[in-house]
Amino acid sequence: MSSLPGPLEALQKRIRQRWYAGFAWVVHETAPWSPAPASLAGATIALVSTCGIYRLDHHVPFDAWHDLGDPSFREIHVDTPPERLRIAHSHYDSTQAAADLNVVLPIAHFRRLAADGVIGGLHPWAYSFMGYLAEPAQLIRETAPEVARRLRAEGVHAAFLTPC
């Protein structure tokens, strides 16, 4: 395992001091490779966010104040009116994101890309996670693979991630 670059080491130290003494970055020496679709113009793209977005009238909010974070996900239909969406995340200032949710879940932009033929289509379901997870084991072993299985089964070619 390699050592962390200076800025990540400093951030890890700050996280340990402020929120969770046992926090450690998960470092991967290798990663699985998936080649990009041959043509985005024929690809279905899904949106994935780590900004803690949930549907106010349908979901339980993420447990934003839990010391270890919330490893669950929310499935949001892209036709959901923005006024029904909220952010539950206590580890970033979400003021600007809440003012324009397209910053963190760019549905309108991807609809335009599909209408212009830049991408083949926008997948009808977006997936939202809460990005802060001091203990990511459940996300790595269960939650993320479940979303990946769903996307693969539904014929999605690529995902666009908006990290927060």
Image: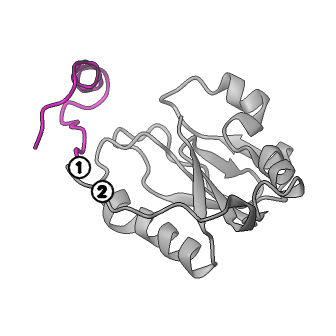
| Rendered location of residue 116, percent (x, y) | 88, 52
Q: Position of residue 79 (x, y in %)?
A: 85, 59
The alpha-carbon separation of the residues under discs 1 and 2 comes to 7 Å
Q: Is residue 66 left or right of residue 152?
A: left
Look at 40% across and 44% down and name the residue there: 69
Q: Give the quarter of the figure containing the N terminus.
A: top left
In-image side of 14 versus 93 (left or right):
left
Q: Is residue 84 at all visible to an observer of this figure?
A: no
- What residue sits 42% from the left and 54% below the top? 71
Give, as a single range, the part of the protein colored magenta: 1-27
Q: Residues within 10 Å of mark 1 (few under 14, many from 20)?
A: few
x and y percent of residue 95 in the render?
A: 68, 23
Viewer-proximal residue among 15 and 32: 32
Residue placed under numbered mark 2 in the picture: 31
For label 1, the SS is loop
Q: Position of residue 17 (x, y in %)?
A: 24, 20
Give SS at disc 2. Answer: loop
Mark 2, residues whose alpha carbon is within 10 Å: few (<14), some, or many (≥20)? Answer: few
Determine which quarter of the picture holds residue 4: top left
Which mark identifies residue 37?
A: none
Q: Residue 164 versus residue 45: which sits nearer the camera?
A: 45
Labels 1 & 2 near each other (Cβ < 8 A): yes
**Amino acid type of disc 2?**
Ala
Marking on residue 28: 1
Under mark 1, the amino acid is His
Magenta span has 5? yes
The answer to whether residue 73 is left or right of residue 104 is left
